[in-house]
Amino acid sequence: MQSELINNYGGAFEENLLLEIQQYGRIKKVQPGDFLIDFGQTISAMPLLFSGAVKVLREDDNGDELLLYFLEKGDTCAMTFSCCMGQSKSEIRAVAETEAELLMIPIAQMELWMQKYKSWRAFVLNSYHSRMTELLETVDSLAFMKMDERLLKYLIDKSKVNKNSVVRSTHHEIAQDLNSSRVVISRLLKKLENKGKIAQQRNYIKLLDV
């Protein structure tokens, strides 16, 4: 754990804080599709990502989901922290996009560190800022972008977090993330393919001219 902490957060946290994180943190490894946090769940710890990627989703009253943003190496989820501090139940779902290794930090320690360590306060505030920026991008895409533009942006974002130009998602999974229908997504993917933006095979989509 010590080497991962130093590699990911050595430049952000004081030595004493790193020692405390090592003392109280718990390593958790997840596989693609594993749930880290679910709607309505009481949150007892906040994740720090050592490796991999996690997608954060919101759900409407009909049970339809919408992708809010991805978390990557070195990130944490500010919305999780907000629920922890407010002792409220989760309003998001966090699902492993890839194999990932996380360090789970107990709520009690997070509250203490907010007062004890300037670097921790700065880290949390920077996380809020980063996630808010990503949420605004999601709102902008919903309000101002056509569905085919949203779809292409989604594929590009997904390829970046997976560090691979090949996106291994079904049309149904993409439709769920974008709160659309499989029929619409299939039609728009064919449109992107005809434009030379992607190439489709049975089990994957490859980004081309992006």
Image (tube, grey):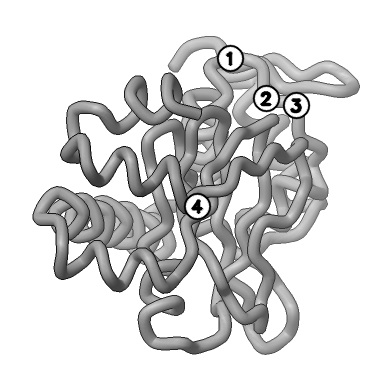
Q: Report the Cα–Cα distance between label 1 and label 4.
A: 24 Å
Q: Position of residue 118 (x, y in %)?
A: 9, 55
Q: Residue at x 58, y 14 (%)?
A: 165
Eyeballing the image, is 11 above or below 116?
above
Checking the image for residue 47, the label placed there is 4
Q: Earlier in the sequence, mark 4 or mark 3?
A: 4
Residue 95 visible to an observer of this rendering: yes
Say which residue label 2 marks. 167
Badge 3 amino acid = Arg
Residue placed most toward the observer, 13 or 142:
13
Q: Report the Cα–Cα distance between label 2 and label 1.
A: 7 Å
Q: Report the Cα–Cα distance between label 3 and label 1.
A: 10 Å
Q: Residues within 10 Å of mark 4 (few under 14, many from 20)?
A: many
Badge 2 amino acid = Val
Say which residue label 1 marks. 164
Checking the image for residue 50, the label placed there is none
Say which residue label 3 marks. 168
Q: Residue at x 33, y 53 (%)?
A: 134
Eyeballing the image, is 132 above or below 29?
below
